[in-house]
Amino acid sequence: MISARSVSVELGGARVVDGVTLELARGEWVTLIGPNGAGKSTLLRAIAGLVSFDGAIELDGAPIGSLARREIGRRLAFVPQSPLLPPELTVREYVLLGRTPHIGTFAAESIRDLEAADQALELLELAGFAKRALRTLSGGEQQRAVLARALAQEAPLLLLDEPTTALDIGRQQQALELVADLRTRIGLTVLSAMHELTLATQYADRLVLLSAGELVAAGPPREILTEELIATHYRAAVRVFHDESGPVAVAPRRGA
Amino acid sequence: MIAAARARARGEGAVGVPSPARRALPIAAGVVFLAASLLVGLAIGPVNIGIGAIAVSIASNIPFLGVHSHLSPTDNAVLWQLRAPRVALGALVGGMLALAGASYQGVFRNPLADPYLLGIGAGAGLGATLAIAYGHNSVQSYDLIPLAAFIGASAAVVGAYLLGRSGGSTAATLILAGVTVAAFLTAVQTFVQQQHTQSLEAVYSWILGSLDTAGWHDVALVAPYIVVSSVVIVLFRRSLDVLSVGDEEAASLGLDVGRTRLVIVVFATVGTAAAVAFSGLIGFVGIIVPHAIRLVLGPSYRLIVPLSLLLGGGFLVLCDVIARSVVAPAELPIGVVTAFFGAPFFAIVLRTSRSFRS
């Protein structure tokens, strides 16, 4: 689905992503972890075709540079860390903007587009909010609206940058359960970037640990979430708790 | 469920907010407002010509209707050679200023953006001042002003754009570049003006704006620019909605953000420069008309863009009626009227819009 080879990104003269190679199979959920400034968001944005990079990124075998913007929009939906929500726009108008890659520049929405938006609203239980202005929604509801907009895009690949920041623990769980559920129901491939290691462990098939722009470890959570790797790259003293299936929680250890 | 979605898609259900049917009503109302404003503009003036006679006269100008006007040749000349071109220019300029304001507000995601944001006003002002100050002996100086203003306006925006691009080409750097260019050009303009104090009054009255000089010749010169610009911007109205979610997300939705912004800015600028060249710097229209629409009908540019054109045109025609009637036979500068009557009107819209929308 995604194939990234030796991808490097320079921003303002600094090498933010440094020679990352990453493969994502159809239907997988892979989560990028790593300390602040490790290059998680930048790598996501490179894969979304939003920043220029060195190396090669292919979507279903097609180099991303060869794809028109609109075509990329049909193949992947990108949810940034802090989306800009026009405060007075209604939820439905906002979700309909997700149909943009399917609508000609000078055309209006077709019935098919309106149906896709309504379907996304229903999937995220937002049908009752359709006519409300975005500013009247709570943080959790807004997050669902953003996800609905991404789903309305009907792209097989979903890129999520920190989908759970600013949410309480219940909302975090609900948001990720939702993605997990949608992933199986409509067959999405998910690439996310996350800070919260416990949640990352529980929802991803594979974790990719980035540090200072480089990929330092990749594999199933039980291989990546070790106290040693976290101590080295996050400079954090933590304890990793396990159950029979593998690591389930990461807790900071005081005074170590 | 699909049937329900279809019903909603036709605008019949509870959720059918942005359907074309729901947009048709405000646009039809805008057309009626513009038509009524044009009629009022034609009807009011020192020579009394009734609305009925005007309607008949309009019909008599439509081929194959077989209607004959009973207006005297003098009334006919007043109506079609004096008032009509002025009303037409007012509608074109007002529509263009409101449309350009809406466009700039959209592409820069800045509610304070107005048509003069990127230095059009200062550039046109300098151009006109130079033409007035140095062209006053020549017979053609009067014809020179619009050309000089148009060139000044376009050059200012090109300068702002190049300066903004060298600074990173984000919306914020472009606005700052516009402010910088405007400040510089205004300084030059003030200097030239101080060196030619005999031209002070002419410059001042040009800056305040007027539709006074309009003959069909002026209308014919300005119309192509405004019509083409309007058509292009109306075609891009949905792109303006997409831009409202931010550059990066708009790009991830398949929009070529840089190109879209450039096309809209170029056409808004060319149209505004043409409008300003003939009418001077009429303020306030580009800010209040799009915002009044936004406050009442919401932030979708698919309504704001076409309605700005219609309501901006009607609004300026009505302001011009006031400008030429309250102190007749003298005239108020139209910029004074747009602000003096526009500001209280906008205050009312601002106060009542929340309850109206919810």
Image (spheres, rainbow, N blue to C red):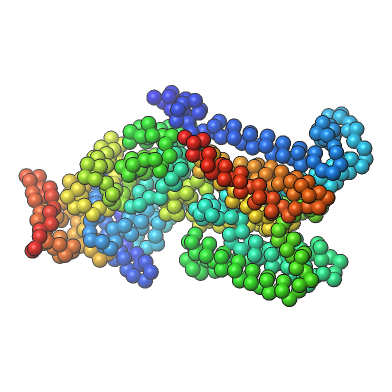
Front residue of B82 and A221? B82
Q: How far across and down, in percent of the image, does residue A203 sit? A: 20, 45
The residue most toward the right is B73
Position of B108 with respect to B320 (left or right) is: left
Front residue of A91 and B265? A91
Q: Residue at x 28, y 35 (%)?
A: A185
Front residue of A242 and B191? B191
The answer to whether one can see residue B59 in this image is no
Q: How far across and down, in percent of the image, does residue A220 sit? A: 16, 51
Q: How far across and down, in percent of the image, does residue B13 sit? A: 46, 26
In which quarter of the view is residue B310 placed?
top right
Q: Residue at x 62, y 52 (%)?
A: B284
Q: Residue at x 19, y 56 (%)?
A: A218
Position of B81 with respect to B38 (left or right) is: right
The residue most toward the left is A244
Q: How far across and down, in percent of the image, does residue B291 sit? A: 56, 46
